[in-house]
Image (cartoon, rainbow, N blue to C red):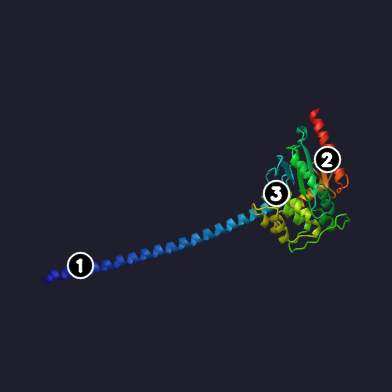
Amino acid sequence: MSYQRSRKQKVAAKERRVQDRELARVERERKARRTSTRRVALRAGAVVAGCAVLAGAGVGVRAAVAAGRRGPVNMASDGLVLWSDGTTASAGPTEPLPEDATPTPSVDLASMGVTQTVAYLDYADPASAAFWAANGAALEDWLASSGGYTTLELHPLALTARSSDAGATSDATPHPDPTDAGLDHAARTANAFACVAANDPDLALAVNDALFAASGAGGLTDDELVALVRDTGVSTGGWERCIRGGRYADWVARATDRATTAVPFDGVGPVSAAPLVVVGGRQYTGDPGDADAFAAFLAEVTDEISAGVRS
């Protein structure tokens, strides 16, 4: 090998080393840029994801608040309408009443021979309890045996707490709140009924019976309310969380306000005391605990409706 050739080879080797070092430097910089870009992208993605979570949480909170302000499903009239096919009582489905909307009165079915009974009740009110103890079973039998020609509409109210707060005298003795929930017994039991109406409405009548059966206990804790509802067979939906959280407490207050302002029935004024019972558009004014008097009134109105259809 000549000196000249050896020299050229050394120069070529040196140039290759320089090129290799340059290529390695370029590759390191490219990797560094890619790593930096990835880190920025990850941070940006985390920020976007965090914002999305926060936005989603905000939407969820707003939705939960809005849901709490709406009325319960199946109670667009502020009451739950029940009918029977001759064997079992079923609830009529409706959309929830939006906040501060006007309740939709049930359709008048008298022209079709249907007798509609509407009862405004307070589970903490002794007069309401006396009415249901005397007439509840008869109303349920009447509903079941009518072949679809009767309906029963239940409106839970919280009047006893209101009369207590106002310092008014009343035959109804307000029950103290036995829990830390901050809600009066009347409001809590009305909320419990609404929770069942929204989640398992066909069992709402059974819950109504159970609430009145326990009305003399001086108030129920949340655990006792939940146990009472569970014992009726209610198992569908988030009714327990609804009861413990007082989800429809605001609606109970608004529905009570509406009832004491005006009742959506011809010839019947506001509810000043419970129970207020309307049959075929006529208010029952007899003794709430007199089963014979109410049965006679019910038969009279039903006969009038039937006669009107026949004529």
Tell me which amino acid carries mark 1: Ala
Tell me which amino acid carries mark 3: Leu
In percent of the image, x 52 and y 59: which residue is there?
49
Q: Mark 1 vs mark 3: which is more N-terminal?
A: 1
Give SS at disc 3: helix
Judge from the rendering whether residue 212 lies leftward or rightward of residue 234; answer left or right.
right
Q: Are marks 1 and 2 in contact (CB under 8 Å)?
A: no
Reply above or below: 178 against 287.
Answer: below
Tell which of 97 and 219 is nearer to you.
219
Give SS at disc 1: helix
In the picture of the structure, the residue carrying the numbered disc 3 is: 203
Q: Mark 1 vs mark 2: which is more N-terminal?
A: 1
Reply above or below: 1 against 225.
Answer: below
Tell which of 85 and 18 is nearer to you.
85
In the picture of the structure, the residue carrying the numbered disc 2 is: 298
- In the image, residue 168 lies at what x, y percent? 88, 56
Looking at this rendering, what residue extends furthest in the left direction? 2
Categorize mark 1 by other alpha carbons within 10 Å: few (<14), some (14-19), many (20+).
Answer: few
